[in-house]
Amino acid sequence: MEQAVIAALLVVGLVIGAGVGASYARAQRGWKDYQTIRTSVPGARRNAWTAIRGVVVKIAVIALLTVGAAAYAASGSDEERASPTPTGTPTPSHRPGR
């Protein structure tokens, strides 16, 4: 009977040990991943700000070009049009009946 109890305790110990060992290995792997990511965050943050700065510069250039084009279109061209322009002297008109 004593050998059966020892065998049962051994099996229970092996199952618990395997579970604890797997949990320890998972925790160790998680800690290693955390340390790797923590050291890469400053570089990733710097890259993100560089990308944001590039987008902001492109948007600013597009906005300036759009405002400039709208201002140029609103001011009109420097060329005179071929349409007749009003003169300062009145033209005599004939009044019928006088």
Image (spheres, helix red, strand yellow):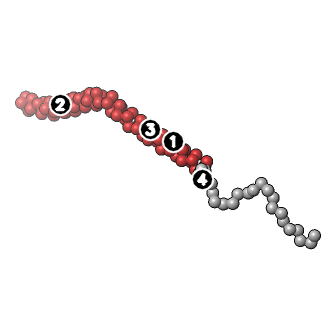
In front: label 2 or label 3: 3
Tell me where residue 92 appears, x and y as whole percent: 83, 63
Question: How far apart are the alpha carbons under marks 2 and 3?
Answer: 53 Å
- Residue at which label 1 appears: 64
Q: Amino acid at mark 4?
A: Glu
User: 64 or 6: which is nearer to us?
Assistant: 64
Secondary structure category for the residue under label 1:
helix
Up/down of 81 relative to 70, above or below? below
* Residue in view at x 38 percent, y 37 percent: 51
Tell me where residue 37 appears, x and y as whole percent: 28, 31
Q: Which mark is residue 79?
A: 4
Q: Which mark is residue 57?
A: 3
Tell me the crowding category of disc 3: few under 14, some 14 to 19, or many 20 or more residues within 10 angstroms, Cα based: few
Asked whether the residues under the numbered discs 3 and 1 touch, taking CB atoms below 8 Å apart as contact, a structural biologist would say: no
In the rendered image, which quarter contains the C terminus?
A: bottom right
User: 17 or 64: which is nearer to us?
Assistant: 64
Question: How far apart are the alpha carbons under marks 1 and 4?
Answer: 25 Å
In front: label 2 or label 1: 1
Q: Amino acid at mark 2?
A: Gly
In the rendered image, which quarter contains the N terminus?
A: top left
Q: Which mark is residue 21?
A: 2
Q: Is residue 89 visible?
A: yes
Up/down of 70 relative to 19, above or below? below
* Residue in view at x 59 percent, y 51 percent: 77
Work out whether mark 1 precedes mark 4 in sequence or the reverse, and give the earlier one: 1
Work out whether mark 2 precedes mark 1 in sequence or the reverse, and give the earlier one: 2
Work out whether mark 2 precedes mark 3 in sequence or the reverse, and give the earlier one: 2
Tell me the crowding category of disc 2: few under 14, some 14 to 19, or many 20 or more residues within 10 angstroms, Cα based: few
